[in-house]
Image (tube, grey):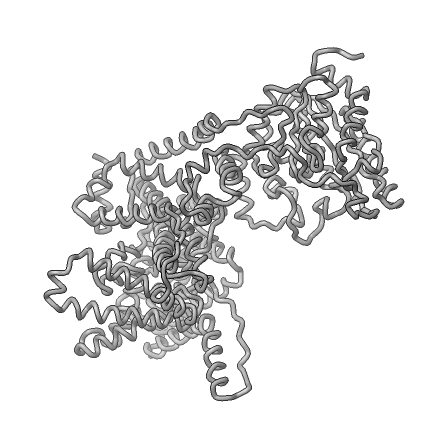
Amino acid sequence: MLFNSWIFVVFFMVVYPVYVVLRGTPFMVPWLLLASYAFYAWLNPLYLPLVGYATAITYFAAWLMEKAGRRKLWLILSLVNSLGLLGFFKYAGFATDNLNALLGHMGASYRIPAPGILLPIGISFFTFRTVSYIIDYYRGQVPRERSLIRFAAYVAFFPQLLMGPIERSTNLLPQLSGAPKITRQDIADGLSLFIVGLFKKAALADYLALYADKVFDAPAQFKAPALVLASFAYAWQIYFDFSGYTDMARGIGQMMGFRLMLNFSNPYLATDLGDFWRRWHISLSTWFKDYVYIPLGGNRAGQFNTYKNMILTMVISGLWHGAAWTFVIWGALHAAGRVVTRELERAAFYREKVPKLAKQMGVFAFVTFAWIFFRAPTFHDASLIVTRIFTTGWADPAFPVLALVLVLAVWLYEHLYESQHKWMLALAPARVAIVVMMAVYLTVFAGSGAQPFIYFQF
Amino acid sequence: MREATAAKRVSAAEGGTLCTHEVRLSGRQWILAIALIAAAFLSLPLVWQGIERFRPAADYRIPYALSSDYWFFGRYCRWAASRADTLVIGDSVVWGQYVGKDQTLPHCLNRLAGRDRFVNMGVDGMHPAALAGLIEYYGRAISGKNVIVYCNLLWMSSKRHDLQVEKEFQFNHPALVPQFSPKIPCYKASYSRRFSIAVQRLVPLLAWTDHLRVAYFDQMSIPAWTVKNPYDSLLKAALRGLPAPDDGPHQEPVQWTERGLAKQDFPWVQLDTSFQWRSFQRMLETLQARGNRLLVVVGPFNEHMLEPGSLEAYARLREGVAAWLREHGIAHYVAPVLASEDYADASHPLSKGYAVLAKELFVEAAFARFDAEERGNHVP
């Protein structure tokens, strides 16, 4: 179920009061687990055995590490199981398509039948949670979680189940072990987060999607201005969509007394690609840093290896997002961008003389360009869009003025937030007015149909 | 002071950041915000009613384009209930699908009465299950009035019309039918959608935003409208005025035989298991509970279009309806069949048909009693 749906409101109105009563009792965690599984099963009951299986294997792998020794063996088996599960559901079709393409290229008539497997929503996220736990346990960074129920609740905790943040066990398990305190400010802050997230999703992301989808679905019909603006619209759409979900997830968690990690920090104000990835999908980028980049060697073995490890990590990250070569290209572009901006920052002139705004604009333009490959359904479409951006002339892009005004308003808000004029946003009348305007705008202007979240597909 | 303390505590715990678009409010500020939001929600539709020009002329009928604008129907009800003696409610037969606004049943009744006493409240596609919902949620202003309720038996002419088939299909006005109980087998909307509809019925603001969408933005959401009309002013579109009422017929007024329609063997449903009939009964109960005086007109179905077997079943159905109305003391008139050439299809009369129907109704004793009670005259 979507957070921005009435069915979720009903769900939360049932779950929350019972949770508040059971807080601190032995029944709190089982209730959260039951609610989380009900939340997941609402999408498709067949998902439940999957998350249950992933949870059980990881739990028992850690148990065996403690009881039976041979820690590395159980670690490897757990990782093979978790990543194998992810690989099967997410990449079987991709592997089949590529093998069939290779067979065709070699002149073979045989084709491997398409697996036709439905990708369970959230699998990428809960798999990474189980993987981070077992690796952290192996490294001695977390104690073994004794309770299977609590561990299952950590893996499936409903606010973050479908689209993150990819919570580390070090953050969430201790919170599930205690009796979360809920203060009035927690409820106030939770509501604030939720309404901001809802506004980002329903008023901004779904609005921009109308234009972006129109152009990306038929790029040959549009010229450069529309293609550029559609890329711009998509850049903001995916940001509002994903960060909006995270805000809602964190808001729900906050109202329950849980602190979920910050996942976005004004990424489009980044001054280089490294900065961008410290601001965008922070839970994923830190995951890749801790479990891929650093184990590969990180930046400990010279510049060449540093860049090699960075590129590998970004390409794998691209592949995590989707089973298609366009995602690999997207990851590779970001890898290239990181290398270039890192080298540029070494130059004193660039570091000290180029205005911050120019760097931000440059990074935003590059990231938007890379989103073309992320969004386009095929490599052919992505190439077509890029080619037409540089070769076609002027045509009225017909971009809605209201959408432009909204995006500029948010961009201005972000600039103010990170500037010395932040105090203006802290004034109580301004804050109350913004919340009232958001609520009225959502009700009067936002479309009536809730669109699925973009990251559901990853 | 408490706000500052709370903010500091959170700041200390989290390194100061709730989210980068945070709009943090304290508890008191949230209460103020909620109060302001509630005030806005309550006042916006009322303020809009003051701004939106709505002065129906004689023979006004709801513009066809606003058939699914239930907020507007509510507004029209309030206007009609304050001005007219008698409201005539029903589907496109009352609205006048094949006739101009000055040829409908309410117009013909007004002509016979010598002044405008009857208001056309007909809405296209308004089958009994939908009409029951429309009256229940948006027709509260119909209270203490004379109401002529048109009963079109077409809605019981098959299981599909009666909404009893399992296979999903797009029927009229799904947002007005019962969302949860009783279950309608062919209605397969998601629970989320159903909840959304249920909430819209309770919150006038939501019905009003739908009104804006239907009346001013080509039935699209406002964002979708701006994508289609990127440089057009929202304000200008919203202030251009309601769609004009349809003066002429919505469909060409041609006899059913000339339209190429053949005789039909309608598989009429049983009255005691008919969902549409139960809905019609529910609507009558709602109207009576609100102190309205009712006259049910059982419409003259085009019997010339029925095969003999189907005609018998129809006659049983019609008699069953009349028997139930008699049993419950509800004034009614079972209209005799019109001449074949006075029909445009199975249930819609042409202009001459409406004139004949009005004339017959006007001299009917049940109508005379019904009409006299409204005007305060007792008829023995």
Quarter of the image for residue A158 reads bottom left
Q: Is residue A453 left or right of residue A424?
A: right
For the C terminus of chain A, the image quarter is bottom left
The relative height of residue A298 versus residue A262 in the rendered view (above or below) is below
Q: Position of residue B26 (x, y in %)?
A: 29, 37
Q: Nearer the viewer, residue A358 or B140?
A: A358
**Visible in this render: residue B300?**
yes
Q: Residue at x 57, y 33 (%)?
A: B244
Q: How many marks are shown on the rendered structure?
A: 0
Q: Nearer the viewer, residue A292 or A418?
A: A418
Q: Position of residue B177 (x, y in %)?
A: 63, 40
Q: Residue at x 36, y 77 (%)?
A: A76
Q: Nearer the viewer, residue A264 or B359?
A: B359
Q: Is residue B338 left or right of residue A417?
A: right
Residue lying farthest right? B308
**Visible in this render: residue A15?**
no
Q: Position of residue A191 (x, y in %)?
A: 35, 43
Q: Is residue A266 left or right of residue B35?
A: left
The relative height of residue B57 versus residue A56 in the rendered view (above or below) is above
Quarter of the image for residue B316 reads top right
Q: Is residue B5 left or right of residue A41?
A: left
Quarter of the image for residue B133 reads top right
Residue lying farthest bottom? A107
Q: Position of residue B163 (x, y in %)?
A: 70, 46
Q: Residue at x 53, y 74 (%)?
A: A115
Q: Nearer the viewer, residue B279 or A7?
A: B279
